[in-house]
Image: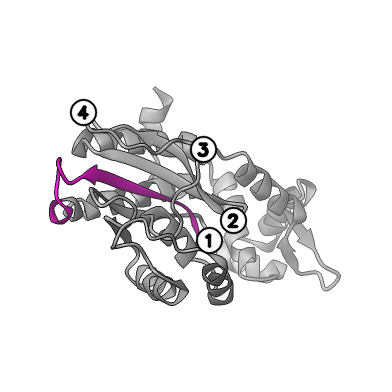
């Protein structure tokens, strides 16, 4: 990266901390004020910084518009799918990706198990919100007041003897999920099916999606499935880093080939 571009880009995280004067920018960059001014003017012309009436500079509205546009055009499913496939190839079990949309939690991707026993879940269909691991992960990240309001208006079907029975029990489980950073469904929806899941976080740390690995007891028991938790969490973290743009960069020389 050229020195000029590097210096210009270094100004943006500085201004993200708050407005700064020309002298502060020059000092932080280790350059003369005239050099800092030239960089700031260029960024100002592109709307990336804005000069206030007090002559200090702050981040410009164009920068926020670009960031919002980039986020809106991200396809989480497209980003996540190769990671889900890789996880499936490692463990052999069914892998799901889910998001919360208009009050429901929906599967938006699924990689089938390599084993003959298949799950009935379908892409685009809502999950059993009071028992599914992915639903617990998405709801646990809500602010407390919203989390409580959602829990209190849900119905609690008794799918199996292990299903969550009421709002109080659900809120207690969500608190545990929020604290530990992962979730399970051990026979809560179907007695023969177990599931372990992890959250996918965006750049702001909030949960934007959740993923899980599921398997029937005839293939693998609950205890053995739980040993996959570190792998599931690493996969979710990798998806989150790529989605938020914080994944490790490739070697520039390799990228140029």
Q: CA distance from mark 3 to mark 1?
A: 26 Å
Query: What colour scheme governs how the chains and residues are painted in the rendered image of this protein?
Result: one colour
Mark 1 lies on a secondary structure that is loop
Q: CA distance from mark 2 to mark 3?
A: 14 Å
Q: CA distance from mark 3 to mark 4?
A: 23 Å
Residue 2 located left or right of residue 214 = right
According to the picture, the residue beneath numbered tag 4 turns out to be 116
Q: Which residues are magenta?
A: 207-224
According to the picture, the residue beneath numbered tag 1 turns out to be 204
User: Closer to the camera: disc 3 or disc 1?
Assistant: 3
C-beta proximity under 8 Å, tags 4 and 2: no
Residue 78 located left or right of residue 61 = left
Which dot marks residue 103?
Answer: 2
C-beta proximity under 8 Å, tags 4 and 1: no
Q: Is disc 1 surrounded by few (<14), some (14 to 19) or many (20+) residues within 10 Å?
A: few
Q: CA distance from mark 1 to mark 2?
A: 21 Å
Sequence-wise, the earlier of marks 3 and 1 is 3
Which dot marks residue 124?
Answer: 3
């Amino acid at each position: 990266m050229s020195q000029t571009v590097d210096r210009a880009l270094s100004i943006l995280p500085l201004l993200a901390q708050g407005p700064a004067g020309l002298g502060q920018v020059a000092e932080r960059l280790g350059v003369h004020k005239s050099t800092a001014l030239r960089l700031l003017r260029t960024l100002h012309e592109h709307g990336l910084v804005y000069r206030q009436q007090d002559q200090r500079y702050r981040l410009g509205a164009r920068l926020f518009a670009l960031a919002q546009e980039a986020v809106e055009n991200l396809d989480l499913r497209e980003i996540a799918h190769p990671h889900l496939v890789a996880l499936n190839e490692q463990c052999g079990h069914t892998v799901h990706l889910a998001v919360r949309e208009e009050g429901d939690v929906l599967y938006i991707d699924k990689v089938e198990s390599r084993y003959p026993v298949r799950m009935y879940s379908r892409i685009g269909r809502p999950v059993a919100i009071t028992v599914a691991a992915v639903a617990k992960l998405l709801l646990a990240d809500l602010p407390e007041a919203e989390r409580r309001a959602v829990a209190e208006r849900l119905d609690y079907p008794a799918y199996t003897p292990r299903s969550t029975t009421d709002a109080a029990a659900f809120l207690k489980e969500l608190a545990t999920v929020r604290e530990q950073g992962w979730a399970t469904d051990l026979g809560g929806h179907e007695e023969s099916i177990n599931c372990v899941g992890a959250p996918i976080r965006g750049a702001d740390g909030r949960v934007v999606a959740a993923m899980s690995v599921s398997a029937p007891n005839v293939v693998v028991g609950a205890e053995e499935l739980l040993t996959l938790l570190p792998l599931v969490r690493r996969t979710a973290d990798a998806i989150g880093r790529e989605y938020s743009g914080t994944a490790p960069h490739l070697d520039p020389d390799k990228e140029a080939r």
